[in-house]
Amino acid sequence: MEEPVARPVAGEAFAYATARLSPTARRILEAAHRVLTRDGYEGLTLRRIAAEAGETKSLIIYHFESKAGLVATLVDSLWHDTDVALVDGLHEPPDPLTGHARELIALHRDLALQTSLYATYFDLLPYILRDRDARRRLAEFYDSYRRIGVMCLESSTVPLEDRDALTTLLLGIGEGVAAQALIDPDAVDTEGVFALLAEMLYACLGGTAGPLVAQVREAVDWESGAPPLPPETEPDPAGDLAPVAVNLLTAARQVVHERGFRALTLETVAARAGEPRSAVSYYFGDKRGLVHRLHATVDHQNRALMRRAVRRLPVGVKRIPAVIATQERALTRLTAFRRHYELLPVVLRDEALRVREASAHRSLRDALAGCLAGSDEPGRLRRLQGLASLSIAAPAGLAIQRLVASEDVDPAAALHLWTRIVMGALKAPVTPD
């Protein structure tokens, strides 16, 4: 008989830490929320939190051990109420095929719709990733969230060996869609995307296809290749730069990668490039000018990589697995994802950067929809926007889990399962390997 999964509340050091806080600790945590909202992470100091809460720094240390402990509990508090409601509702009769997977998907949908919560989380994430203690504590929370997911699958027909991977995948898709909704809220149908995901899982497990899956099936052409992409119209933003400026941009990218955005100053860039500080000011003006040129350059490079990847896709039914395999390879290095999440808080605070990032997302989504459709016919592309959004979200969210605790996450297993869900839900024709 199958062993039930232990409920992730009692006896755990970190899971649901918010539920066990004393009134004083809760007051401190609420004060930390206010300071973070008002002053950003740079202003989230123990001194300011203590002043906001009307308590002492030593009392904060007593309740949370360190700033890392406070920040990790701050993150857990963002999702706490929604997670508790899900666990409390698991006494309801499960679906014979999917167990409580629909409720789990609905949880990720509800969280993704609360964009202010995810804006706070993505504001904290770069700093958590660079603090070993905060990262360790957040890894504990992620482990708990995944076990909540496995608990939702107890009564499902999902094979035991796939449940960890499915929970990891759904958590990744949830966070990936949340990031899309923040970057491009006008173009991401969050509710529709999660409704399609629930239908796909149900159909993959043998259930009757819902209307959203039926629309996607009608739009996919399994025989064609990817349609040609329109020619690139945007010039290379680094193409007109002098060699010194290119060297400075390269140094800026290295500083962000190695030390984070906080370390990106005109002085550090100049020192890393071996150029005078005046050179940075001459070519880019101020830090904002440098960041804008850096973001434009990264965006142009990403678009070029996407175009090359699309041109290499095989014709016919193998092109969807080929797309996912490309994403799996990107997850082995994580360089692009680390840079993305390092810059995301900056992008979300700067409207010009957000608009450029949204344009890049739409281009990628349209290219993926075209790969799925085997056509650039507008009606087909519209019906495939949701699946394209899910396909972008999966590796983006899995990257967060890998960045937090790479040893706890197997992105290959999650993406292989995603391939099976897509191909199974869409009734892909079986071809010789």
Image (spheres, rainbow, N blue to C red):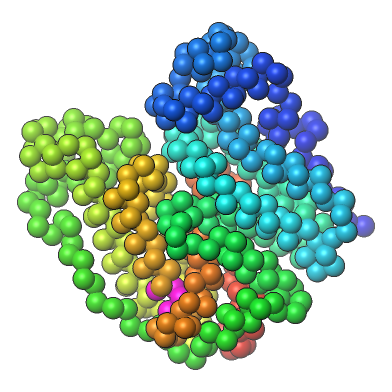
| Residue 335 visible somewhere in the drawing | no
Residue 164, quarter of the rendered image: bottom right
Residue 65, quarter of the rendered image: top right
Towards the viewer: 128 or 369: 369
- Decide if residue 281 is on the left or right side of residue 8: left
Q: Residue at x 63, y 77 (%)?
A: 213
Is residue 30 depicted above or below 240 in this figure?
A: above
Q: Residue at x 47, y 83 (%)?
A: 379
Q: What are the residue bounds of the magenta stretch?
A: 367-371
User: Which secondary structure dominates the residues rendered in magenta?
Assistant: helix
> Which quadrant is the N terminus positioned in?
bottom right
- Decide if residue 135 is on the left or right side of residue 204: left
Residue 105: image location, x then y, percent: 67, 58
Q: Residue at x 73, y 61 (%)?
A: 102
Residue 142: image location, x then y, percent: 63, 43
| Residue 70 visible somewhere in the drawing | yes
Residue 127: image location, x then y, percent: 44, 34
- Decide if residue 115 is on the left or right side of residue 76: left
Q: Residue at x 81, y 49 (%)?
A: 89
Q: Residue furthest right?
A: 1
